[in-house]
Image (tube, grey):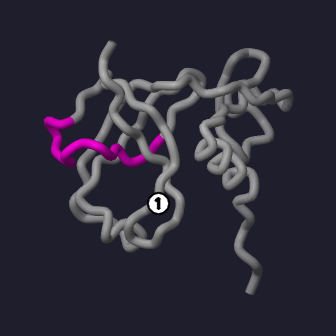
Amino acid sequence: MSAPASNGAYDEWLDALADGEGYALVCPDGHGSLPPRRVCPECGSTSLSEAPLAETGSVETYSVVHVAGPRFTDDTPYVNVVADFGPVRLTGVLRGIEPAPDAVAVGDRVAVGVEERATDGDPLVVFRPVESE
């Protein structure tokens, strides 16, 4: 039996995000991706640099999850969100709101961080609502 694949680069990214230093990997053409990428998925460039994530992002789409897989059983119901943070889109759980379809809207502003998953305590990308300015 082979050993499980390492998530080293992703884990380092998650640690940076938890420390408030989230970043995207950006090629010279401005295409963004997340670790563990070594090549830009858009243009094939191997010249990737770290660019800080914006402080807030915008909800692009969401769904309310009532029946989840085993790793999220104790977290339900929750709102799963895809949010635009400039060169990248992040997927995570929206907390700080009632998990209902009318509690979130496309375009809502969110901040990103890392919190624990209720089911097993593992780290999880989490969004929190940001008050409109």
Q: State whether residue 37 is above or below residue 75.
A: above
* Residue at the image point whose x is 70% and y is 60% from the top: 7
* Residue at the image point whose x is 65% and y is 39% from the top: 34
Residue span colored magenta: 91-103
Q: State whether residue 124 is above or below residue 103.
A: below
Instruction: From the image, tell me which residue sits under label 1.
Output: 116
Q: Is residue 61 left or right of residue 100?
A: right
Label 1 SS: strand
x, y percent for residue 89: 51, 32
* Residue at the image point whose x is 14% and y is 36% from the top: 102
In the image, residue 93 lies in the stretch drawn in magenta: yes
Q: Quadrant of residue 67?
A: bottom left
Q: Is residue 96 left or right of residue 110?
A: left
x, y percent for residue 79: 29, 47
**CA neighbours of label 1 inside 10 A, class few (<14), some (14 to 19), many (20+):** few
* Residue at the image point whose x is 45% and y is 72% from the top: 120
x, y percent for residue 112: 48, 37
Q: Nearer the viewer, residue 115 or 81?
A: 115
Q: Quadrant of residue 69?
A: bottom left
